[in-house]
């Protein structure tokens, strides 16, 4: 991998049609940034020849509730989930494959507190791992 290679963040779109209790777009962007750094992929400051532009679309997202998960996922009201589509571009052209990541937490009671962010953390980790593997091809 080239020393100059690195991601550049494009848009993060919330296509769910509703808002969450926190800014899921910025949270996801920051989690992807952190996961990429953990994988040794440094962010580029601008769209250079070696920059990979990451576009993220949040198609489905539900925070769920810890109480609902404690009750055993009563009618799925407690379930937290995220469905995120990631596209990668280099020099204006598609780079590698696209990724659809799905993260679901349907049970766990108190052990699942914070699941509304964990599903995004899991998605960010999968996106970073995927991009790292694509960059090796």
Image: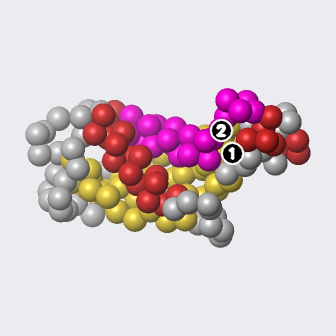
Which sits in the foreground, 15 or 89?
A: 15
Give the residue number, with chain letter if any, for mark 2. 113
- The quadrant in which residue 90 appears is bottom left
Q: Report the label total.
A: 2
Q: Quadrant of the C terminus?
A: top left
Left or right, 112 with respect to 127, comes to: right
As drawn, 43 above or below 91: above
Question: Which contiguous range is marked in magenta?
Answer: 108-129
Is residue 102 visible to the viewer in this orientation of the structure? Answer: no
In the image, what residue occupies the spot 11% across and 40% down?
3
As drawn, 112 above or below 120: above
Label 2 sits on a secondary structure element that is loop
Which sits in the foreground, 36 or 117?
A: 117
Q: Is residue 68 magenta?
A: no
Label 1 sits on a secondary structure element that is strand
- The quadrant in which residue 5 appears is top left
């Amino acid at each position: 991998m080239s020393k100059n290679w690195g991601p550049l963040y494009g848009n993060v779109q919330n296509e769910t049609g509703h808002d969450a209790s926190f800014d899921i777009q910025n949270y996801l962007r920051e989690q992807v940034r952190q996961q990429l750094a953990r994988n040794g992929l440094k962010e580029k400051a601008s769209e250079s020849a070696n920059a990979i532009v990451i576009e993220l679309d949040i198609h489905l997202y539900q925070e769920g509730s810890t109480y609902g998960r404690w009750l055993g996922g009563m009618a799925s009201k407690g379930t937290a989930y995220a469905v995120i589509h990631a596209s990668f571009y280099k020099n204006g052209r598609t780079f590698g494959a696209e990724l659809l990541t799905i993260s679901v937490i349907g049970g766990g009671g108190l052990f699942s507190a914070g699941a509304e962010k964990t599903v995004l953390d899991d998605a960010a980790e999968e996106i970073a791992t995927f991009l790292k593997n694509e960059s090796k091809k």
